[in-house]
Amino acid sequence: MTTVLLVRHGQSTWNAAGLMQGQTAHVPLSELGHEQARAAAAELAGLAPGAMVASDLHRAVQTAEHCMAATGRRFTTTPALREQGYGVLEGRPSRELWDVVDWTDVHWAAQGGESLAQLHARVAAYLSDLQAAPPADVVALVTHGDTIRAAQAVVAGDGPEGMPHTTPHNGSITRLEL
């Protein structure tokens, strides 16, 4: 059995501004986000991961750097752990999107974006590969809210419609067993 510790990145500047970020690559952590990342890193150090992998998006990489400093564990990056892509909606105020996005249809995707079903399939494939060849007994994955929700559904044996409605807080750690 492999323990997976899903670390959600700290608050980004776009989280703070209420903007839809999705897979926009360059969004950095806010000052609060750096504090949250340092707190998550301190908690992670106590859980002693033997390996660490991060999304390749800047906010996750910055969080992983704090985790590396606290654990002494180097990390690799992968696009498989990216947030759900929102295509043309990225950079827009989130509050404007409630009437644009069909949150009930797991197959809906914005132009140039990714549906919940596609996100779920991407995360399921990554976790299947991780389970087949785990780099350690305890693996930290530094990632994003929707990606964590997808991982929770995959591990529970649920499809994308079974993804939890609650997104883990910035700088939190969610533990799953593969």
Image (tube, rainbow, N blue to C red):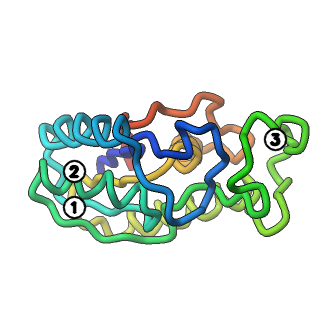
Q: CA distance from mark 1 to mark 3?
A: 37 Å
What residue is pinned by disc 1?
Answer: 51
**Please, what secondary structure does the residue beneath circle 2 have?**
helix
What residue is pinned by disc 2?
Answer: 67
> Quick check: 101 left or right of 172?
right
Label 1 Cα crowd, 10 Å radius (few <14 / some 14-19 / many 20+): some
Quadrant in the rendering for residue 51: bottom left
Q: Amino acid at mark 2?
A: Cys
First reached walking from the N terminus: tag 3 or tag 2 = 2
> Quick check: 84 left or right of 97?
left
Q: Position of residue 85 (x, y in %)?
A: 67, 60
Image position of 82 with respect to 78: above or below: above
Residue occupying the point 59% across, 46% down: 146
Residue occupying the point 43% across, 36% down: 170
Q: Which mark is residue 97?
A: 3
First reached walking from the N terminus: tag 2 or tag 1 = 1
Q: Are marks 3 and 2 in contact (CB under 8 Å)?
A: no
- Towards the viewer: 173 or 19: 19
